[in-house]
Image (cartoon, rainbow, N blue to C red):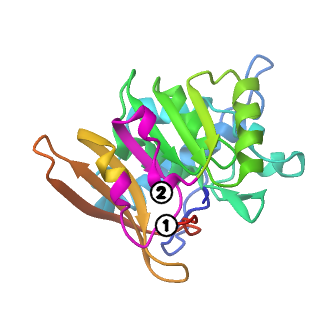
Amino acid sequence: MKLGCTLLLPLLLVLALTAPPASAGDPPYSAERQEMIAEIEADVKMTSERIGKRSLNPQTMKAMGKVPRHEFVSDQLKKHAYENRPLPIGYGQTISQPYIVALMTDLAEVEKGDVVLEVGTGSGYQAAVLAECGVQVYSIEIIEELAKSAEQRLARLGYSLVEVRSGDGYYGWEEHAPFDAIIVTAAASHVPPPLVKQLKPDGRMICPVGGPFMTQHLMLVEKKEDSKIITRQVLPVLFVPLTGGH
């Protein structure tokens, strides 16, 4: 299971935005980061009717601008790290398009101190973005090698609010449930019942639903105080399938 999504919408021509020149004190790839943020903002406006908003939460955008995406890809791909598209991370998996990561983070409506489950760690990029929002992240990755490398990478970068383990995320992480939010980064044929069970009342889950090579939709799942479940299709997307023994 893994972060591998891109937006499934026709490509539109967008006027290029010129970022101000980077200074010596700026973080690495500063100009590229600014351009990525501008492209995310353009995608949000382009899809505003579908997602129901013309801008994302400032907290989300601040986190997207702060996480060093170049640290989550191979050395050969660092020069492409801030392009608004998925990139390969090995084992047939990818790191998701920045716009999708930003949108899923925003839809989760997390607040500082929340506890979030991520299903599909991949390189750890989505988990890092969530951690920048001040939440405790428990992340599960079914590919053991990816789980180990993500855990080491996140620790090296100082993301102490993220805990990673290898396992089948379909069944969640009951030890740390219930969760304020759950983000699933691979497409399931249905919304996993164990994850719904582990969601707090008033919690939100973001999950792509649909089969491989079929239409998939990013779903927003809300559990109300009375445990009533409300779902909404947000966008057509393309994710790799959720794998495991379920």
Considering only vertical position in the picture, is 93 above or below 210? above
Helix, strand or loop for disc 2: helix
Nearer to us of marks 1 and 2 is 1
Q: Say whether residue 97 is left or right of residue 199.
A: right
Helix, strand or loop for disc 1: loop
Q: Say whether residue 56 is left or right of residue 27.
A: left
Residue topped by disc 2: 170
Q: Residue at x 35, y 61 (%)?
A: 219
User: Which is nearer the eye, 34 or 232?
Assistant: 232
State which region is magenta: 168-194
Amino acid found under the numbered disc labelled 1: His
Query: Can residue 18 be spotted in the picture?
Result: no
Q: Distance of mark 1 from mark 2, alpha carbons? A: 7 Å
Q: Say whether residue 84 is left or right of residue 197.
A: right
User: Which is nearer the eye, 246 or 51?
Assistant: 246
Q: Residue at x 54, y 72 (%)?
A: 11
Label 1 with label 2: CB-CB less than 8 Å: yes
Return the residue found at the far top: 25
Residue topped by disc 1: 246
Q: Indicate yes or no whether the magenta region holds residue 85.
A: no
Percent of width and height locating residue 133: 47, 27
